[in-house]
Amino acid sequence: MYRIIAINLLMFLFCMKQYILFWLSVPFYRIIQNQKWRKIIAENKETEYLRNVLQRNKPGDLPLSTYEDYHHYISSLTHRSRSVLTHDEILLLEPTSGTTSATKLIPYTKGLQKEFNHAIRVWVAGLYVLKPGLIGTTQYWAISPKSTSHDKTAAVPVGFASDSQYLGGQQGRMMENILSLPPQVQQVSSHASWLWYTCRYLLSDHYLGLISVWHPSFLLLITTFIEENFDGLILSIETGSIPAKVEKQPSLPLKPHAQRAKYLKETKGKIGKIHFPALWPRLQIISCWADNSDDISLKEVKALFPGITIQPKGIIATEGIISFPLGKRSGVAAFMSHHLEFIQIGTEKLKKLHEVETGGIYEPVITTSGGLYRYRMNDQVQITRKLAGILPTMRFLGKRDMVSDIRGEKVSLLQAQEIRSHWQSRGVEPDFFMLSPVEDGKNAFYVCYVYSSKPEKIIDTYRKLTIKAEEILSSNFYYAHARKLGQLKELRIFLLSHDPTREILRIQEKRGTKLGDIKIMELSRHTQWHTHFKGRFL
């Protein structure tokens, strides 16, 4: 216990310097952003990428870029690691599988690591300020099973050995000493075994105070496994045994904890079921993606952990960090990390951070020390307020390039969200909602997949709302044209018999998407959900 307190205090003091510096710098964020732009361009102007771009453009007029603009340069990094995208040596390429595209390899440098740490240290210090009791607890930061391995023959390796390497150096080493899970869990290749080790280590930890995951459905994957395998996990905690079906890992020793096993048994016995806050009596905060308050996974997490603070994640990607949570505030612009710009939705004008307006919707554009210059994130964010009346804060709305297009109809995520919002305005709030196309031979049509705990009372209402949903989709010229030509049939509703979140996670993971990268949105481009889900068409 004293060791945990000592490490947490060191971590707090280590991060507090950056926390204080951040608050002192808020009034001067515009100056800092200008300095950051000049510094990144000056340090990297002799790189292969910027030399080519600057032959045609002035430094202040660099064009917007996407991953495709870097693909050739990143491919050449298998042979050399300097002066291609950055003057810094590229330490590794981190894979990311985005919501709407195939796997990308993102360059990672010491400079990029420092930029991440500018925000992460402020975030971590803010956690201790918000919840001082965290000083006496351990932490769980979600670790997905490895989907790729290091390529030891390449000049630049692929993938971190553990997630704590994002932090690097002293902070990373300190963090590893207060984590509930050893980093070796990430190396377990079997998904079933990885999930078993994750739940076993978490249940063993009586001092757990912080849970940090990306999507709340990730946490539900863990809680469901604990509920379904509680007795077996308790037996392992009591005896140190490993079930025959679990992959043996010499690097993951499992010590017996008879006292902890007794406590867990008694906790369940008192109320006859698993009460998660009682399993971890020191748990104070869950950090997860929570910008969509209607997300069924988020609602379920809140129900499973009553009384526990839910802290919304910021906009944090492998490419960079745009915003982060700061105490009770969410979506604070990470102005000390990268140079941030924003494309105004509608006008497509490029705005600087100090030019964005509260209520406005924008697409973030980042310039980083990792070799990305005016890189489009393809996210949509809405500016919510100004921190201290000065610094913009924002919330994530969805992917800008999230478009379904099987017959040229170009249905967007915003249209799906508009349908759901209209239903809510009419008093219909399904527990789960997703719009997705279906291709059935020559026929194609869109389906609203809905789950409600009281379906029998609103079936007729759903049928009426289908008309309005069709109107919303038809306001899109391309959808209306496809309907007129007979390329698409009329929208239908599929009434689900249960919440399909876990099926979606299982299917997406089978397709190669890391659990931590899966985001369940209101629009999906997958055309065969009706073959996976249980339910019926109305």
Image (cartoon, grey):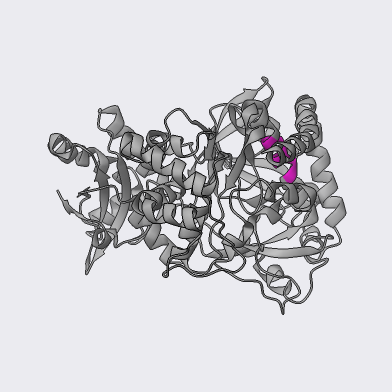
Left of 98 or right of it: where is 373?
right
Residue at image x 71%, y 76%? 152
Which one is in front, 83 or 169? 169
Please give the range of residues in magenta. Answer: 117-124
Residue 159: horizontal and vertical position, in percent?
65, 65
Residue at 66% over, 62% down: 160
Q: How many marks?
A: 0
Q: Quadrant of the N terminus?
A: top right
Q: Is residue 177 magenta?
A: no
Please identify the dominant SS of the magenta region.
helix
Name the spot of residue 441 as percent of width and height, x first. 22, 69
Q: Can residue 399 be seen by looking at this rendering?
A: no
Residue 52 at what x, y percent from top left?
A: 78, 64
Q: Left or right: 431 with respect to 284?
A: left
Which residue lies at the image location 72% right of the left edge and 39% below the top edge? 121
Give above or below for 40 relative to 293: below
In the displayed image of the protein, which residue is found farthest to the bottom?
Answer: 153
Image spot of residue 147 (x, y percent): 54, 67
